[in-house]
Amino acid sequence: MAGNEAPKFSDEQMACLATATKEYLTTNAQFVLRATGKGTTIMSVDNTIAQRRLVEGYCKRWAACLSSNVKDDSLRETVLRGTFAGCLENEAKSDEEGQPSEDR
């Protein structure tokens, strides 16, 4: 990949990303509804922990989807780690801003 050329993802990778994102957003919305349904915007400690685990699982899936076409094991692990860390960082930033993250 030269210069600023965007990476190319397969249809399978895009389908994987779409499924992971849809499941994440659906489950995350349930946490928000539970908190706001009680007349508050503050989540319980247990729900906050569960939501964090949800984000971690989502970022792990996101990274696995994006690294699935990397053939070299060592390089795939590097891509997986970097993508996972970037996803967590973006989700943390979007959480601070109160908005869903659009790009990882």
Image (cartoon, helix red, strand yellow):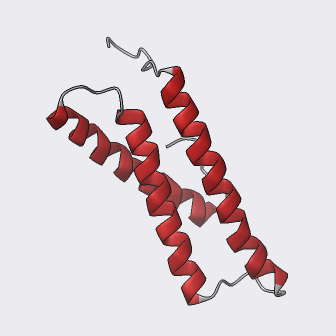
> Looking at the image, how many numbered discs can be counted on the residues?
0
Going 56% across and 71% down the picture, which residue do you hit?
Answer: 51
Q: Is residue 96 above or below residue 77?
A: below
Q: Position of residue 49 (x, y in %)?
A: 50, 79
Report whether residue 100 is seen: no
**What residue is drawn where x is 31% and y is 43%?**
80
Residue furthest to the top in view is 2
- Give the left or right position of residue 86, taking residue 71 as reference: right
70 vs 35: above or below: above
Relative to 66, 40 lies left or right: right
The answer to whether residue 33 is above or below residue 90 is: below
**Residue 99 image-quadrant placement:** bottom right
Rendered residue at 42%/20% (across/down): 7
Q: Quadrant of the N terminus?
A: top left
Q: Position of residue 26 (x, y in %)?
A: 70, 57
Whole-percent x and y of residue 54?
Answer: 52, 65
Residue sitting farthest toward the front: 12
